[in-house]
Image: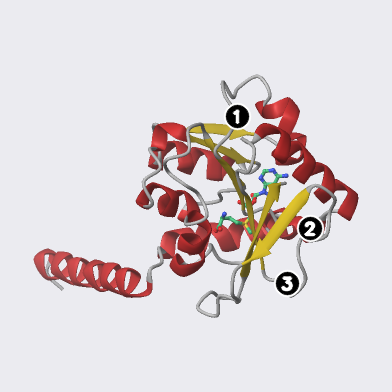
Amino acid sequence: MPLEALQQLERTIESRIRRFEQRNGIRLDDEVRFIRSWLEKPLSTGAVTPSGRVLARTMARYVDANTAGPVVELGPGTGPVTEALIAEGIAPERLVLVEFNPTFCQLLRARFPSATVVLGDAYGLRRLLGGLLQQPAAAIVSGLPLFTKPVRMRLRLLRDALELLRPGAPFVQFTYAVVPPIPKRLVGVRAEASERIWKNMPPARVWVYRKG
Ligand SMILES: C[S@@+](CC[C@H](N)C(=O)[O-])C[C@H]1O[C@@H](n2cnc3c(N)ncnc32)[C@H](O)[C@@H]1O
């Protein structure tokens, strides 16, 4: 086949892939990165594919862009929730992204150059962010696979997160499970849940915890 025809074929295939991605709200290269990460570390990756658009938007809508302070994301992965936060009006400069996987950190730095990307373990939140945050956070949004950790670690994470947040500001967490990822009846904490999001694969629910 002549070179020109080959190049034309390549362009056609690429444009079909882009159209497929746009129609379905996914990026195939991110799907591949995610599957690779899941094969290497299934427990810490916690999902086989990145969150879908509807789930990401649902999480982002719990964050009030008008509340002052940084917005922290735990376990951003390839960044679908980060993108939704920006689409909801959060300036990228306000974002602090805490990710465990160095390959995802590299990708996040390239995709969101104005955000602060922190390579580290989100369960050490206070130590990791205590010196970094200049003011209380407006929200903490988490994609961490919490069920891979014992309940006492999840409770400690929530307690540390609430200490870093403005009073009444949300700690937002999604889960594929039918039960809350952190017990919903805790002294001094208000918890609420979204409807189940059937348009995600697998279906998910968003839980929100606030001091109060
Ligand atoms: C279920 S994926 C969610 C990714 C992304 N938020 C999304 O919705 O598609 C979990 C992410 O949390 C990261 N992660 C897991 N444990 C972590 C930890 N202890 N500290 C920071 N990130 C962690 C994984 O590397 C992965 O990117």
Please name whichever residue, 169 or 56, is drawn nearer the observer in this view of the structure. Answer: 169
Mark nearer the N terminus (2 vs 1): 1
Residue 148 in which image quadrant: bottom right
Disc 3 from disc 2: Cα separation: 11 Å
Q: Is residue 208 above or below residue 131?
A: below
Question: Where's residue 174, x and y in %?
Answer: 63, 61
Question: Where's residue 194, x and y in %?
Answer: 60, 69
Please name whichever residue, 212 or 142, is drawn nearer the observer in this view of the structure. Answer: 212
Colour scheme employed for the rendering of this structure: secondary structure
Q: Residues within 10 Å of mark 1 (few under 14, many from 20)?
A: some
Q: Kindly give the residue lying farthest to the front in the view shown.
A: 212
Q: Residue at x 89, y 49 (%)?
A: 152
Q: Amino acid at mark 1?
A: Pro
Q: Dot 1: what SS?
A: loop
Q: Is residue 115 left or right of residue 43?
A: left
Q: Amino acid at mark 2?
A: Ile
Mark nearer the N terminus (3 vs 1): 1
Q: Kindly give the residue lying farthest to the bottom in the view shown.
A: 198
Per the rendering, the mark at residue 182 is 2
Please name whichever residue, 212 or 180, is drawn nearer the observer in this view of the structure. Answer: 212
Q: Which residue is mark 1?
A: 136
Residue 59 visible, this angle:
yes
- The answer to whether mark 3 and mark 2 are in CB contact below 8 A is no
Q: Which residue is mark 3?
A: 177
Dot in front, 2 or 1: 1
